[in-house]
């Protein structure tokens, strides 16, 4: 393998706002493989609404149409908080120091990057690829003064060094969030409310079959 993409999230549930931007980014950056890394116990937010089994099942169904994407369960197999720094250390231990590893995040996540556990060390382990997301303009990155990273505008740079660069990737805007999807489902608004534009049909089917997200008060 020449390069690896990593895409973490709660995926509660996985949706086209994950799948499409990541596919575009993988193609723009020449990433052979992107691993979706579902979080077990995200330190920054409340517990996921769907349980781990269901979140995993939905990702599995969604990724069937995306051969370049894989599920990586390492955070689910760890006890305690899923800190990204530990996940990246684990990828480095597995793939060695020379493989370019690119961590994909939406602009909303990047804007809060400096609240993450040991965030200053993250560029020592991976590149950070920031994907545009509607409603979340990227803050001036100089805000995160950090001698460990450098902004790059050249895709080749991402392949000629294993980590340390921040790269901004414009993607087709998709105004979808898992919160919005859960709220639609909770209100039992089904047929015409845009669900089919938000999620793969197999995931919608799974949600309905298992009655997910129906009787939960929304946490956000
Ligand atoms: P929630 O609404 O529950 O907070 P979410 O839709 O933001 O969920 P997450 O699983 O929390 O989804 O996000 C995983 C990653 O996907 C994050 O890096 C986030 O920025 C990115 N992401 C989610 N939705 C979009 C979108 N519509 N466009 C671009 N990136 C997105």
Image: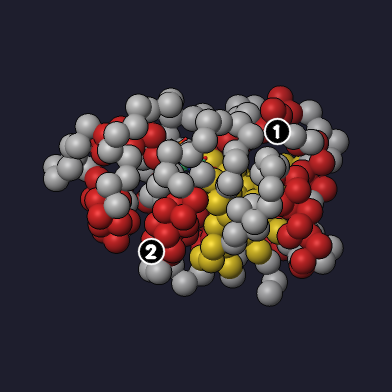
Image spot of residue 66 (x, y percent): 43, 67
Q: Nearer the viewer, mark 2 or mark 1?
A: 2
Q: Residues within 10 Å of mark 2 (few under 14, many from 20)?
A: some
Judged left or right of residue 24, residue 150 is: right
Question: Residue at left 44%, top 63%?
Answer: 60
Question: Residue at left 49%, top 30%?
Answer: 136
The answer to whether residue 131 of the structure is visible from this angle is no
Q: How is the image coloured?
A: secondary structure
Judged left or right of residue 203, residue 131 is: right
Label disc, if present, on residue 116 of the rendered structure? 1
The reply to whether the C-beta atoms of the residues labelled 2 and 1 are less than 8 Å apart is no
Image spot of residue 168 (x, y percent): 60, 44
Image spot of residue 191 (x, y percent): 14, 45
Farthest residue in the bottom direction?
1
The answer to whether residue 207 of the structure is visible from this angle is yes
Image spot of residue 149 (x, y percent): 79, 41
Could you tell me which quadrant the N terminus lies in?
bottom right
Residue in front for this viewpoint, 212 or 134: 212
Question: Residue at left 48%, top 39%?
Answer: 48
| Disc 2 secondary structure class | helix
Farthest residue in the left direction?
192
Question: Residue at left 24%, top 51%?
Answer: 208
Q: How many discs mark residues in the rendered view?
A: 2
Could you tell me which quadrant the C terminus lies in?
top left
Look at the picture and state if 193 lies above or below 59.
above
Residue in front for this viewpoint, 160 or 202: 202
Query: What residue sits right under mark 2 in the picture?
Result: 61
Residue in front for this viewpoint, 199 or 214: 214
Query: Gap between marks 2 and 1, in whole Å?
Result: 30 Å
Q: Quadrant of the rendered structure where residue 146 is?
A: top right
């Amino acid at each position: 393998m020449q390069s690896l993409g990593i895409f973490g999230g709660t995926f509660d549930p996985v949706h086209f706002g994950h799948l499409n931007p990541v596919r575009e980014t993988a193609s723009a950056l020449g990433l052979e493989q992107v691993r979706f890394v579902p979080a077990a116990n995200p330190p920054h937010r409340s517990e996921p609404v769907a349980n781990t089994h269901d979140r995993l099942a939905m990702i599995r169904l969604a990724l069937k149409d995306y051969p370049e994407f894989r599920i990586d369960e390492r955070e689910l197999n760890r006890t305690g908080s899923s800190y990204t720094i530990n996940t990246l250390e684990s990828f480095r231990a597995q793939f060695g120091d020379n493989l370019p590893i690119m961590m994909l995040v939406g602009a909303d996540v990047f804007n809060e990057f400096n609240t993450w556990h040991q965030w200053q060390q993250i560029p020592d382990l991976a590149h950070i690829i920031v994907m545009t997301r509607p409603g979340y303009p990227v803050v001036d990155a100089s805000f995160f003064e950090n001698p460990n990273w450098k902004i790059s505008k050249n895709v080749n740079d991402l392949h000629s060094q294993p980590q340390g660069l921040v790269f901004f990737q414009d993607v087709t805007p998709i105004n979808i969030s898992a919160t919005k999807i859960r709220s639609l489902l909770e209100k039992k608004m089904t047929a015409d409310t845009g669900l089919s534009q938000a999620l793969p049909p197999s995931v919608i089917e799974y949600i309905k079959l298992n009655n997910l997200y129906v009787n939960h008060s929304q946490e956000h």
